[in-house]
Image (spheres, rainbow, N blue to C red):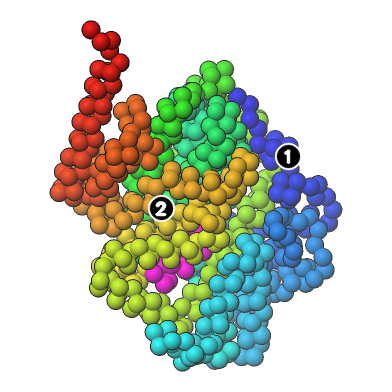
Amino acid sequence: MDRKDPKLSEGLSPLEAESGKETKGFHAWFILMVAGAMALYHLYALSGITIVTSVKLYAIHLGFSLLLIFLIYPFHSKSRAIKTRFPVYDLILGIMGALTSVYIIVFYQDFIFRIDNAPTVPDLIVGAITILLVLEISRRTIGFSMPVVAVVFLAYAFLGYMMPPMLRHRGYDLERVISHLFSEQGIFNIPIGISVRYVFLFILFGSFLEASGGGKFLIDLATAMFGGTRGGPAKAETVSSAFFGTISGSAVANVIGTGTFTIPMMKSIGYKSHFAAAVECASSTGGQIMPPVMGAGAFILAELVGISYLDVCKAAAIPAVLYFLSIYIMIDFEAAKTGLRGLSWSELPRLGPLLKKDFLFAIPIFALIFLLVGLKTTATMAGFWATVVTFIITFCRKETRMNWKKIWDTLADGAIKATQVAAVCACAGIIIGIVALTGVGLKVSAIMIDLGGVSVLLSLFIAMCISLILGMGLPTTAAYIICAAIVAPSLIKLGLTPLGAHLFIFYFSCLSAITPPVAVAAYVAAGIARANPVQVGFTAVRLGIAAFIVPYMFVYGPALLLKGDTYSILWAIVTATIGITALASSMERWFMGQSASWFQAGLLLASALLLIKPGIITDMIGLGLLGMAFMLWAWNKKRRRKEASPIS
């Protein structure tokens, strides 16, 4: 199977690949030079060769991002497409953004001590400009959703004295708000630090892996392993999305990266358009919760909880496997119901020759895992050296060897992709700064704790709704950061472990990508499949139903997060796996090779919920209900056999 990524095979620059237009001339050259320089600086600053103070590093990161975004993303654009020429006003805005960072670096020694205590007039002017520019770059890169949320929080900072008693505060003047947001308590807070130290390197790692052909290798590997089975292309898509999650933490990026190949394959063997698109977006959304990368939100989660990134990956592993297992089984049942076949032998990549030819592409991923797990290095060092390993292996074969232009284009590609995350994180810093300044997080926590006095389950449900609603139209990272500041503290005060509370809201922030009515990933997948996006969204929710249930289960039973003794963990995994299978059977109404009645489906659903939740009593009841479903199936089978036998 010869499926080439046009972005790679045609030798396009990052700007050409994004815009689909030829980008020759000074404007394109200048953007590529700035983006490449940004990537090189980050590699130097994060390599350990030198030590750069946090605020300086964050300022340089933001300065590069401001300049690039104003030069690349247009002022007016419904599609947010990359532009290939920049007007004078964008050049001026970009330079202003870069100069705000230069200001911090030049006056760093005094600035760092005075900004949040006794700011000067120039501090306030530069701070106000930076805040406005950050709002604008977030609008240009992800649309109005996040800057509108940030503006609402800004208004709350000024007008809080007019709010109802439960949300009221004394209100703050312009000087106090600007000085607070233009400091380590605002824009230069944890989110932008995560963007610099972790996300940038992992995006760069993904760019080098994709440029060398590693992304295509992962898709071909999954197709070779599962493409020939019943409903094979859909299963291959599920596995490839899990693989692809190691190099991309974005649901939309996963849909685009794998869906371009897998959706047409699924449709070719008989899957309906909306189901093929739903499989793609449900699986791609799961890529965000699949270790070892898990997207930017996982790095922030580790930082906020105060544990290592490796610990986050360990805790997320079992729930992620259960999620993909549920989708895989539902695909198999759907194929069984409709009689769909897999790909023919001639259509499949050959596993042996594929591994023999492209095994080098697996080395960077194994290197990343070895660095994180074996050597227990920091995520920063793991991302840096995984990128270096990827760069080195491209020279092992003539076909993947990079010339200077391709190396620079790949560096620039990583930097350009990272600017959107930088914009999101900087804007999130504004929101977090207001939350800290006004104490609204504590107020929301108090409200949820009062509700928790009635029912912890009710508080969890409200936290889920907040995460899903905030995530509609927001990137996962942004939605999670906001929820981490507002919702997580209240869940912890209700008795949840910090890791359980943060993973709970992280999961639902991810799932907002497939949850109607917005369901961004569903819209992208529907566009590729030419299907109804609303139908795609609801089908994706059905396929991903396990992810809506599992967070509740690991809150009540931490064994699914690998917390507890070995026996408890193994028992929880076994019963949860049986429960996930029963859940898939219930959703598809397919049991033991035949259609299930509504009553059987109800029994299977109740059994699934009880089995997924850890606990001996619930497990025994769940197994009992599953046994009833088996007896009903056996009785129906015997009855049909009698009806089919000739009358003597």
582 part of magenta stretch = no
Determine whether 545 is above or below 422 in the image.
above
Q: Quadrant of the C terminus?
A: top left
Q: Nearer the viewer, residue 295 or 411?
A: 295
Circle 2: element type:
loop
Q: Which of the 4 image quadrants contains residue 63?
A: bottom right
Residue 582 in view (yes/no)? no
Point out residue 199 in the picture as x, y percentages from the top left corner.
Answer: 53, 57
Going by the numbered disc 1, the residue's amino acid type is Gly
| Residue visible at 50% across and 79% down in the picture | 434
Determine whether 504 is above or below 13 in the image.
below
Circle 1: element type:
loop
| Residue visible at 63% across and 41% down in the picture | 530
> Quick check: marks 1 and 2 in contact, CB under 8 Å?
no
Q: Residue furthest top?
A: 648
* Residue span colored magenta: 475-487
Which is more N-terminal, label 2 or label 1?
1
Q: Residue furthest front?
A: 647
Label 2: few (<14), some or many (≥20) within 10 Å? some
Report the mark closest to the observer, 1 or 2: 1
Q: Which mark is residue 291?
A: none
Q: In which quarter of the image is the N terminus?
A: top right
Q: Which of 144 and 621 is in front in this view?
A: 621
Q: Which of the 4 image quadrants contains residue 302?
A: bottom left
| Residue visible at 25% across and 54% down in the picture | 558
Residue underneath mark 2: 377
Residue underneath mark 1: 11
